[in-house]
Amino acid sequence: MTIPGRDISYPVPPSSWFTSDSSCWVIIRNRVYDVTDFIFNHPGGPQVIMDYAGQDATAAFYLPREKHLGTLDEGSTRELRAARRNKGKSRDELRVEEAVRDKPPLGQMINVRDIEETAKKMLPYKAMAYYASAADDSITYSENARAFSRFFFHPRVMKAVSGVDPSTTMLGYKTSIPVYISGSALARLGHPLGEANLTRGAYKSGILQMVSSNSSLSYTQIAGARGSPEQPLFFQLYKHKNDDIAARRIREVEELGYKAIFLTVDALVPSNRELDTRAPQYLEEYENQGKIIHGKRTYKSGDVSILGTAGGLIVNNDLDMTWEKTIPWIRSVTKLPIVVKGVTVLIRPTVLVR
């Protein structure tokens, strides 16, 4: 491995290589990163990083440039590739490969449900569990889906329709249809290009995109994927409990040309997303074909955690946001429009005016 100012070569992956919380490095795309000071600040908790300590974490992480120490030398790169080949594929990886081979042509997927069912088969189980999970017994999730079935269109007849235009505007920005891409974290779980694919798709289809605070690509990378500098992007803000960190995020996206701040107010604490939380246990049993391998479980008897992938993303959220304090604070940081996202009850106009 080559580090600026010094050349160091390590066999990959050695058992003692920077794998403690006092010195922790990972490899991403053959580049080495020091994540020691990030372990206990990671949104998903320290174990998420420690699981990849001293290993290739390309599939799991994006890290900022300032964490970059150097690039693996040629010999270590060859060893890393060999380790990947010799590692063998898990049952879940083989299942995904088979699903990708057998997927129907896109032209045969004629509605959203067709695409969703195909995606569930093609995604790694942990990614599927994150994307598809909902809180507890999924009652609110089911009711949200059912709510759309209670909307009815009352068509007007004998009206000229050859020039119908479904486009509209949102915050003054045009969208080809009244649909936008809402902020959703970790798009790279579904595809290596992650949120960049969504940005390019939004540009091609003429719709708007909201970028998640917990995107798997940097806000700069997503802005760089725009089809033109004029393509509008909105930013979904999970306000960090540390005002300085929250302010840096807001100022960063404003400087990058994002057009509005959408403050999420209905996800302050992790919900009990059972499918997501159970994913590691399910995968372990799936790989062992249902057999319990004594002494080999990665989780301890008696341990209870409801964080999962989703819950870990919001553990640093500000739990004390109020109308009186938080909105004026955001306004003091940015001149961008502020949208409050996640209001589920009627609010008195006098509260909003204050």
Image (tube, rainbow, N blue to C red):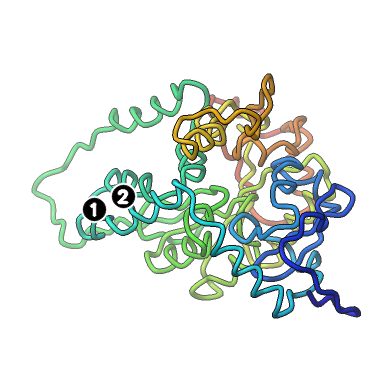
The image position of residue 20, as x and y in percent, is 84, 49
Q: Amino acid at mark 2?
A: Ile
Q: Is residue 120 above or below residue 334?
A: above
Residue 109 shows which numbered tag? 1
Which quadrant of the rendered structure holds the C terminus? top right
Element on which disc 2 rests = helix
Left/right placement of residue 155 relative to residue 209 reads left
Residue annotated with mark 2: 115
Q: Is residue 139 above or below residue 262?
A: above
Which quadrant of the rendered structure holds the N terminus? bottom right
Q: Which residue is depicted at the point 69% across and 44% down?
A: 48
Mark 2 and mark 1 residues within 8 Å of each other at the beta carbon: yes
Which numbered disc flags the more N-terminal residue, 2 or 1?
1
Quadrant assignment, res 349 = top right
- Distance Cα–Cα, label 2 vs label 1: 6 Å
Q: Is residue 218 above or below residue 5?
A: above
Q: Amino acid at mark 1?
A: Met
Left/right placement of residue 38 relative to residue 187 reads right
Left/right placement of residue 135 relative to residue 58 reads left
Q: How crowded is the residue under tag 2: few (<14 C-alpha within 10 Å), some, or many (20+)? A: some
